[in-house]
Image (cartoon, grey):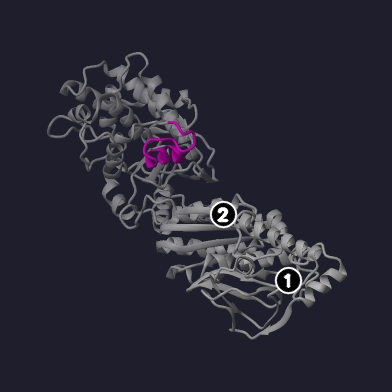
Amino acid sequence: MMPFPVIPARLEALRLRYASDDSGALADYIPELAKADPSWFGMSLCTIDGHVYDCGDSDQEFTIQSVSKPFVYALALADNGPTAMLERVGVEPSGKAFNSILLDGTNRPHNPMVNAGAIATVAMVRGVDGRFDRILETLGAFAGRTLSMDDSVYESERETGHQNRAIAHLMRTAGVFDLDVEEVLDVYFRQCSVLVTSRDLAVMAATLANGGRNPVTGRTALPSEAVGDVLSVMFTSGMYDYSGEWAFETGMPAKSGVSGGIAGLIPGQAGLGVFSPLVDDRGNSVRGTQVCQDFSKDLGFHLFRNRTDSLPPIKSVSIGSARHSYRVRSIAETQLLKHHGNRITAFELQGPWTFIAVERLMRRVGELDSGFVILETSRIGSVDEVAGALMNEFADSIAANGGTLILSGTVPTRLTGLSTVTFPTIDEALEWSEERVLSNLSPEGRPGSTVTVADSDLGRGLDADAAEALARAGRMMRIAEGSAVVHEGTAARSMYLVTSGHLTASIGDRRVASFGPGAIFGEMSFLTGARRTATVVADAACRLVEFNDIGALSPEIRERVHRNIAVVIAQRLTVANRTMTDG
C-alpha cells in the first residue's frame, strides 16, 4: 500500500488556513531580514523515531535568530552545569520585550531566552577561539546536518546591533561576564545568522523531545539530564512576553525568532518547525503562532491536556504468511497462504492512543503491502478525541486504497463508529481475511464447497479404486447446525473428514480451531486412543465422513492413509510453531 496522506493532509490544511493572512511585518530593524519574501510559509513535523513530514516552503533557508537560544543554552549547561549557569543567568520570565536593556534584582539576565540572557550564555560557552565553531557544531548536531552562516545577515546584525551592545555593556559592568564585549557579541551575531529550514527546526525540537538524542541521526546532541532544564525555560520564556498566554493556549515548550521561525515540541512524541517571516510586535511569527495554536488543538499537542505514556503503541506485528488462524486447512491452501499471506497484517495495539500513536500505526501500515489490516484493540487503554478522528480518516484512506481495516477484541468507544469489519477475536479476524485472500486467487488447489474423499488430503495419492475403497470404509453423516460432533473428555473412537459445511472446536469457552471442506479432525485421539481434548460443534449444516476402523483396508491403502495423516499432522505442527514464534 502507498503511504497514507492523513497526517500530511492535516498539516497542509493548517498551513492553508493561514496562508492568506498578511498581518504582521518583516523584522526590518535588521535590514537583511526585510528582504524576505512575505509569502514564504513552511511547516515540518518530526516524530521521535525520526520520520519527518513537510509541507509548503519547508526547504526555504532562513537565519535561525533567537530559535538558537535554547540549543546554545543546552551547550552552556553541558559545559558548566545548572548551578554555575544559574549564578549568571536566571530562569524567571521577564515580562518585558526580548531586547529590553534590563537585569533582574540580582544583576542577572532574567532568563536565557531573552537577548541579555542569550548573550550571557554565549560568554559561558567554553573555548576562546573556537566558541562559535562549537556552537555551530552543536546546532548541527541538533539539526542532524552541517549548517552554515549567512554572512550578509551577520554583517547587517553586527552593524546595527546597538541595543545588544548596550545590553552587553550593562552586563559587563554588572559582572555577569568579564570577557571582551565585542568578542562575545561577534559570536552572538554569528549564532543568530546560522541558516536553517523548518525541517531543521522540527528535527532540533524532536531531539529535545527525544531526550537529547537526534531521532534522525541517532547522535546524542545533549545529555538527557540537561533536557528538563532547557524545556523548562522554553516553556516559561520561549515566546518572550507572550509566553504565559502561549503556555495556557498552546501548551508546548517552544522558541521563536524574529526571522519568522518557531520550534515547538511535546516530550516523548514529536517536534514541530514552522517558518513564516511576518512577525508581530513581540517578534513572534504571526502565521507560525496561529498554526501552533491550532496544531495543539487539532492534533492534541497541549502538554497538560493530553495523556502520554511510555508504552509503544504497537505491541506486535504479524504477517499473514507466518501467522495463521486456527482454521485447519488443506495442504494446498496452506501453501497458498504461505506465498500470499503477506496481504494480511495483524497489529496488536496497546496503551493510551493519541496523535503520535495513530501516526506511527499509519506509517507502519504504509510500509507494508497489506490489503487486510487487522487491529487487535483490547489492550488500548483510552483513545483521545484527536486519535479517534484520525482513525476515522485512516479507515477511509485504507478503503480508498482498496484495502480493508478490521478490528478485533474489545473495541474502545471512540473506535466503534469506524467503517470497518469487527470480530470478537484476532483469530476470527485472521480466518476471515484468509478466506478473502484465497477467494481472490485462482481456485486451483482450493477445496470447493463440497469435497469427496478422493479430493481430500486424506485420500491424497490414492487411485480411483483405492479412494473408493477408503470412502466405503467410512460412514456418511449429516450434522445439524449447532450440534456437537465430539465432546471434550470423551473417548475417541472415530476420526472425521468434512465434506461440506463448517465446524468450530472449543476448549471451554475458548475457540481453538475451525474446520471446513477437506479438513480432517479427531485423528490424533483416534490413532492414540486418548480422550477428546475439545468439543466440536457445527456452525452450519455439515456433511462428514466418520472413520472408526480402517483395519479392513488393504495394507497398501492403509499405509498410504497413515502417511497422509502424518503429513497433515506435521503441517499443523509447523503452522502452530510458526504462529507461536512469529505471532
Residue 359 in percent (x, y) is at: 49, 53
Residue at the (34%, 56%) spot, across then down: 307
Q: Label 1 to label 2, Cα distance in Å?
A: 40 Å
Which span of residues is magenta-colored?
A: 201-219
Q: Is residue 199 visible?
A: yes
Going by the numbered disc 2, the residue's amino acid type is Ser
Residue at the (43%, 68%) spot, across then down: 412
Q: Are marks 1 and 2 in contact (CB under 8 Å)?
A: no
Q: Quadrant of residue 404?
A: bottom right
Q: Is residue 249 left or right of residue 269?
A: left
- Residue named by callout 1: 550
Q: Residue furthest left?
A: 105
**Tag 2's secondary structure?**
strand
Figure label count = 2
Q: Quadrant of residue 518?
A: bottom right
Residue 2 in percent (x, y) is at: 64, 52
Q: Is residue 241 left or right of residue 173?
A: right
- Residue named by callout 2: 318
| Image: 201 above or below 475 | above
Q: Quadrant of the N terminus?
A: bottom right
For this rendering, which residue is in front, 311 or 216?
Answer: 311
Q: Residue furthest top?
A: 129
Q: Quadrant of the C terminus?
A: bottom right
Q: Magenta span has 218? A: yes
Residue 142 in percent (x, y) is at: 42, 33
Residue at the (63%, 54%) spot, across then down: 574
Q: Is residue 444 visible?
A: no
Q: Is residue 432 left or right of residue 174?
A: right
Residue 473 in percent (x, y) is at: 76, 76
The circle on residue 435 is: none
